[in-house]
Amino acid sequence: MEFDLEEKWVEEADNQENGDLEEPASEEESVEKLCPPEVHMLFNSDVEVHDYYRRYGLQNGFGIMIKNTRKIEGVNTYLIVACHRYGYSVRKVVDSLNPKPIVKSNCKARLCAKRLVDDKWRVTQFDNDHNHSLSSSKVYRIRCNRKLTKHAKRSLNLCDEAGIPMNKSYNALVVEHGGHENMTFNKKDCENYMRTIRSIDLDDENRIKNLFWADARCREAYREFGDVVTFDTIYLTNKYDMPFAPFVGVNHHGQSILLGMSTTQRSESMNAFFDDYVNAKTSLREFLGQYDNALKDKVEKEVAADTRSLSTTIPCVTRHVLENQFQEVYTNDKFKEFQKEMINVMYCECALLQSDEAIFDYQVEEIQYVGDS
């Protein structure tokens, strides 16, 4: 069986996870239902093997990654493309009671292909045994299926030069694409792209526009105290050429402190909900539109959180069967809350003081160890 896949590739590899392949990105994913890969199936190149398995995973609800490649004289001769949860992670225990989410789940799904004498690529092995949940409605948010288009990069560059904040630049792209569901990238991808192209930027008068400087003393102080102060010059460009550069501090709880900020009558939760959407000069008509945008953004964040729960797992801190059961049915955020309560129970001692018929008095003490946070 031979496949000649003729598509128009856009040469972008910005979101490639690993390996030496340049993943092709078509403007629209094929709506044709792909059949599962089979042993002895032929492709024209290793790029087509990778793209076929990626689109098959997109159709069936799992992401992929390049697990391994072999080269002879600089030419790829062997390729292993696997599920993004393939294998298992060797976890470095930093805080055993506060484990970080891990992607690997020891999944066995993978596709192996090798290069033939005539430069064709043949599938030599295909395993489709997944040990985790699959979701075709959320898999497009996984890293291997996200790509930042050239048009989006150009728009971000122009907005950055004009001094437009990232949040507004991204919202403009969302409106242009007709909603979050039509986006092929997320806000984090935009932030990462802008971070990679930024260095020490100079304005027209050769003055530094943005700079991050951390010497040895600063790094040691941060390691001991966790204090951070950022100097934001994003408001240097405005209508009246009046620079506004606020100093923002970060306390020990990771909370931002803006010196000189004004208070409002709104609650903190509503402040967080309407951040970057409305202000004191927003009209009623604008408010209705921005309220709708804020709701859509909230829904998008919830879907993104569901995707993270689908593609990652928080390790258990005990061997208790109850914790393992909650790990399988809860989302990551809810399971984290359960783990916190379970750890609190582990750190408590309960002792019976006295009993009087049906009345029992217990003393509950929390155990504190030296060095506990």
Image (cartoon, rainbow, N blue to C red):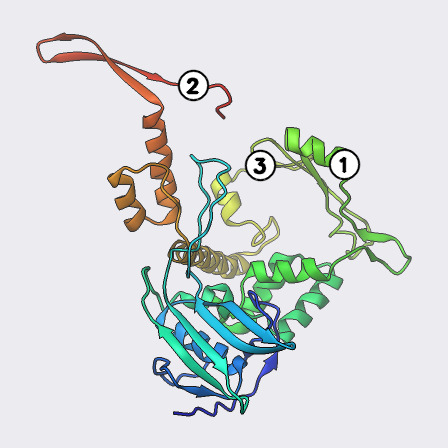
Q: Mark 1 or mark 3, which is nearer the start of the sequence?
A: 1
Closer to the camera in the image, 102 or 93:
93
Q: Helix or strand or loop: what does disc 3 sit on?
A: loop
The residue to which callout 1 is attached is 216
Please name the amino acid that badge 2 sits on. Gln
Choose mark 3 or mark 1, whichever is in front: 1
Q: CA distance from mark 3 to mark 1?
A: 21 Å
The answer to whether 354 is drawn above or below residue 202 in the figure is: above
Pick the front one: 148 or 244: 148
Residue 254: numbered disc: 3
- At which x and y percent is residue 266? 51, 40
- Marks 3/2: CA–CA distance: 24 Å
Q: CA distance from mark 2 to mark 1?
A: 34 Å
Q: Which mark is residue 368?
A: 2
Q: Secondary structure at mark 1?
A: helix
Q: Is residue 32 left or right of residue 362?
A: right
Q: Is residue 232 above or below residue 161?
A: above
Q: What amino acid is labelled 1 in the image?
A: Ala
Task: Write down the quadrant of residue 10 in the picture.
Answer: bottom right
Q: What's the residue at 32%, 27% (across, down)?
A: 345
Question: Which of the marked residues, 2 or 1, is nearer the chain's N terminus?
Answer: 1
152 w.r.t. 209: above or below: below
Amino acid, disc 3:
Gly
User: At which x and y percent is residue 33?
Assistant: 35, 83
Is there CB contact under 8 Å for labels 2 and 1?
no
N-term-proximal mark, 3 vs 2:
3
Q: Secondary structure at mark 2?
A: loop
In the image, residue 124 sits, relative to residue 336, either above or below, namely: below
- Crowd class of label 3 (few under 14; some 14 to 19; many from 20; radius 10 Å): few
Q: Residue furthest right?
A: 205
